[in-house]
Image (cartoon, helix red, strand yellow):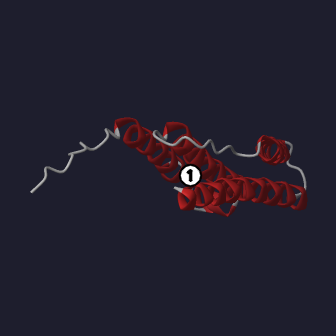
Amino acid sequence: MPDAPSNPPQPRRWTIFAAGFLLLALALVVIYTSSRAFSSPLALVVVAAIGLAALLLQLRLRKGHSTLVRAPLWLNVLGLVFAIAVVAADILHSSANVMLVAALGSVVCFAISGTTVLQALRKNKKKI
């Protein structure tokens, strides 16, 4: 029988550290937030931003892929502007409607950005 070339598994140390760090961030948000605050639009924006950060960090730490997948910068900047508007509306005790619209805009921008990245990854995986 011919010897099959053995490929040792690639070390995944940095991706494990990054995943652990993001889980720690999410755990801190959950632990130190009261149950009443989870109905706040600000909590929704924070959780969406942590999810997008996880996806973008995973892209950054991927090795062995020649194709480059990028998140749409303008969409992430728009989501960040909406997130800042949510924080400002919360600090200034603005109308609840303004806060909800800004939170919805932020979460939608982050969701579309994440979906775009995942779709590009799937297309690249099919080509390989």
Query: What residue would you read off at disc 1?
Result: 33
Along the viewing direction, whichever of 35 and 80 lies nearer the viewer:
80
- At a point 40% along the width and 35% down the height, the residue shown is 14
What is the crowding at mark 1: few (fewer than 14 residues within 10 Å), some, or many (at least 20)?
Answer: few
Amino acid at dot 1: Thr
Would you say 37 lies left or right of 54 here? right
Which residue lies most toward the left here? Answer: 1
Q: Position of residue 51 (x, y in %)?
A: 59, 52
Image location (x, y in percent) of residue 60: 55, 37
102 in relation to 72, above or below: below
9 and 60: which is toward the camera? 9
106, 29: nearer the viewer: 106
Res 123 → quadrant: bottom right
Query: How many numbered badges does the structure rendering display?
Result: 1
Task: Give the quadrant of the N terminus.
Answer: bottom left
- Dot 1: what SS? loop
Q: Is residue 4 above or below residue 64?
A: below
- Counting from the top left corner in percent of width and height, residue 97 is at 89, 62
Residue in the image at 62% along x and 41% along y:
68
- Please give left or right for residue 43 compared with residue 102 in the image: left
Residue found at the far front of this picture: 2
Q: Position of residue 127 (x, y in %)?
A: 57, 58
Residue located 59% across and 43% down the image: 67
Q: Residue at 20% x, 45% y: name it.
A: 6
